[in-house]
Image (spheres, rainbow, N blue to C red):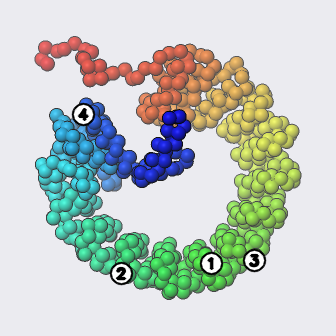
Amino acid sequence: MPEGDWRAFLDTAARRGGLLIPRGGDLVFLHQTLLEHLAARHVLRDPKEGARAIRRAFHQPRRCRPAVPMSVYARGTPPGVRPRAWGLRYWAPPADSSSTGFLLDAAHDAGLGLRRSPLRRLASRGGLPGWEFVAAQAHMGTRLPDDVVATAAGHLHAYTGPEFSARIRTQAAEALTRLGDPRGPDLLYGFAVDASCPEFDRFRVAGALVEHGDPRGPAWLVVVSKDPDVSSKVRRDAAAALATIGDPRAAGLFLAIALAGSSSGRDRVPAAESAAELGDPRALDALYALCLAPDMPAAYRVAAAEALATRGDPRGPASLLSVSLDVNVQQAVRVRAAGALVSAGDPRGADRLHALGLSSGGPGQARLEAGVALAGIGDPRAAEVFHSLAANRGEGQHDRVRAAKQLAALGDHRSHGLLLALSRDPGISGSPRVEAATALAALDEPAAAEQLHALTWARALSTRDQLAAAVALACLGDRRAAHALHLLALCPEVPDPSRVNAARALVGLGDPHAAGLLRALPALLDPNTFGDYLLDVPRLLAGLGDARAAELLAALPAPLWPGEQTSNLVRGILEEVGRPPRGPRPRRGSRRTGRRTGPRSPST
């Protein structure tokens, strides 16, 4: 049979099987769990490979370290892990519970026994994360040894005691419930009705009761949603949990939150919207009431009006127009209301944006946003707004430069003169002047290079701004930038990323002093700051063919080395200078070498 016919037959058979679907010109599994199940079965066909796969999945070593206060897991060793000394190793659970569960089931069916069970290790010494992993596996239906389940259940029940924090106690009770222990639901309900527990933890355990199918869960969610002493955010989340299970009381609870004056404005509008999504006919009236509520901040009134306009209610655009005309409302909120009016298809929105963009009393950022909104709908009046803002000396410096750049993006030739004037204005600080000159260079303006060169040596500018001007000048291929780059990059007040940018620009110019600058940079870099940009120093030096790139690489801070992407960069640098890549030198007596590297003491 011809190969093309055979492949066509296989493709047709795979599509009809129901396990694979076409996506992006290829066949993929209908669901990720099918792939994980079949992959686990395939791996366990070979017992040795299956054992290695399980060991790899459970090989998650961590080091015990002291806790930092004010954190759930304290950013140190998790609860339940009791080290004999800080720095000792313990084992975290696998990151992927689903695929690991399929591996465990396949190992059970294949009769594969491991000399050291990683599940028993997690159940006895894995701490709360390890016990939660065992509970998750039991909840998914993974076949687990009875002693593993019993050990995890005993530890979890112990950690529901009053000597632990509310977060740890509730997490342990949730895991105990997922494990199938009959004590779990009663513990969860006890935490839900305990007024001493934080309100979010009480809501969370009520949701866990709902997930478990306990009838006390929905009833307690209703109580939480109606409690005026509970924050409106938690009350809304409780109503949302009820809506998820199709409880008919959810819509009324949402409306009660929306109309309660004690609720936060940021929760009242989303609550009314949730009621509208559930089909409650009272929701639109509630949204309109929020548009008119005098105690509602203007930004939330705009959000309510937007929700009305989205649902086709004519009261929405009318409310948006009212806010955009209200001089007592912040300019930025009025611009947002006018933009929402445009989105609703009301022609008055563009007129309001134009008027707000030309309003001299408003802040420059709000006027700029009005112009951007006009430009977004293709209104030619946007150019007038941008020109007015850029030419107004009373506006903010950055707003004027950004307005001139927006004018340039529209193709208006007046932007050239504005950008040049802004870059030459001594009354403007250095950063906006360099930004204006750089934008002028992007427009291929001949005067841009001269202005950048002038800014490079302007004493009124900070060293950082001078260096930014020199880098922009180098990007134009102007060799006059070379001396300034070399000189300014060595100044002590220049931040490290700017130094590296200067060296990169000097290399781009092909300057012979680039290698010398790169070799001098490591002594100037802050040893307390780390970033992948530091790898550019040896990488650029390697690109110049300098063998000392490897020495610079070894001098960089150690935190740069971990991680696959960083390791690949390091490997590429070493290969470029002709040295084989090497890992860190093993410590004395390290197990990585398989033997002791030092003399064996008589007492050992």
- Which one is in front in this view, the residue at disc 4 or the one at disc 3? 4
Q: Which residue is mark 3?
A: 348
183 vs 522: above or below: below
Secondary structure beneath label 1: helix
Q: Name which residue type carries label 2.
A: Lys
**Residue 440, percent across and down?**
80, 44
Q: CA distance from mark 2 to mark 1?
A: 29 Å
**If you read the primary sequence from the N terminus, does the residue marked by circle 4 or circle 2 appear first?**
4
Q: Which residue is mark 1?
A: 309
Instruction: Say the numbered circle drawn on residue 47.
Output: 4
Q: In front here: 136 or 423?
A: 136
378 vs 57: above or below: below
- Which one is in front in this view, the residue at disc 1 or the one at disc 3? 1
- The answer to whether residue 437 shows anywhere in this view is no
**Residue 441, percent across and down?**
79, 41
Instruction: Say the numbered circle drawn on residue 226.
Output: 2
